Amino acid sequence: GNSVTQMEGPVTLSEEAFLTINCTYTATGYPSLFWYVQYPGEGLQLLLKATKADDKGSNKGFEATYRKETTSFHLEKGSVQVSDSAVYFCALAHNAGGTSYGKLTFGQGTILTVHP
Amino acid sequence: NAGVTQTPKFRILKIGQSMTLQCTQDMNHNYMYWYRQDPGMGLKLIYYSVGAGITDKGEVPNGYNVSRSTTEDFPLRLELAAPSQTSVYFCASRHRGLETQYFGPGTRLLVL
């Protein structure tokens, strides 16, 4: 079945450091890939997405590229801020001939803490 | 425009009690979902609905029931609470033609 694996966390960085959170997936067909972010005390919100191979999603300085050859969708940011402290989830949407109804499979989440 | 709202925010139940977690969205979305989030784990799909009157099981439906009588509301029912149902529950919705799901703030449930 479909699955998503994220790098073990938590991740602790100093402000302005470079961030990478690894995400790999297993899926049949051609899933869409997402990064969701959960700030303390809030629900998840979409950070970025990519719907086909080699697409790059980007938002708020974060980027991720859909790599079908390595089945990966790693999240990167060149210079993190304290306000980026949150939990980050990688997810895929099943695409199964139009009957998947957008159900998401999530990775386990990575806690990011950024210190001043 | 409130988006997706969930009530209550936090609840403590005793084993065997029942309760309903409420979820409402005001975006006229066709699809709605219930997920649970256990510590250190990703979200797992409990039930979903593609429209009023239509629901289906997700990955972990045992111990839960849902109904969808209106487009806006998608309540989740726990009939006989068990400690294994201690979790954070998230409701989400999306428009049929778009992929982005919008999440509520979650309900934290503790079963003792």
Image: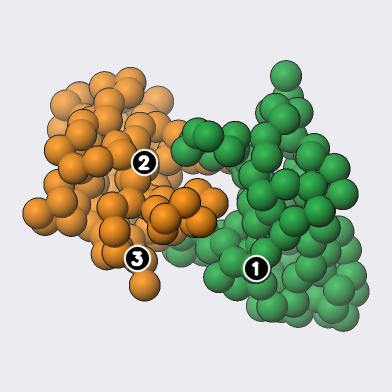
Chain colours: A orange, B green
Residue tagged 2 = A35
A67 vs B108, left or right, is left
Question: The C terminus of chain B lies in which quarter of the figure?
Answer: bottom right
Q: Position of residue B55 (x, y in %)?
A: 72, 59
Earlier-in-chain disc, 3 versus 2 = 3
Q: Nearer the viewer, mark 3 or mark 2?
A: 3
At a point 80% along the width and 38% down the height, the residue shown is: B72
Q: Is residue B87 above or below residue A59?
A: below
Which chain's residue wears label 3? A
Which residue is tagged 3?
A3
Same chain for labels 3 and 1? Say yes or no.
Answer: no
Residue A111, visible in the rendered structure: no
Query: From the viewer's perspective, is residue A20 above or below residue B110?
Result: above
Identify the amino acid type marked 2.
Answer: Trp
Callout 2: 10 Å neighbours few (<14), some, many (20+)?
many
* Label 3: how many Cα within 10 Å (few below 14, some 14–19, many 20+): some
Please identify, in this view, whether the residue under mark 3 or under mark 1 is nearer the observer. 1
Label 2 element class: strand
Q: Is residue B72 above or below residue A95?
A: above
**Residue located at (36% from left, 72% from top):** A1
Are discs 2 and 1 both within one chain? Answer: no
Residue type at mark 1 is: Lys
| Rendered-image quadrant of the N terminus of chain B | top right
In front: label 2 or label 1:
1
Q: Secondary structure at mark 1?
A: strand
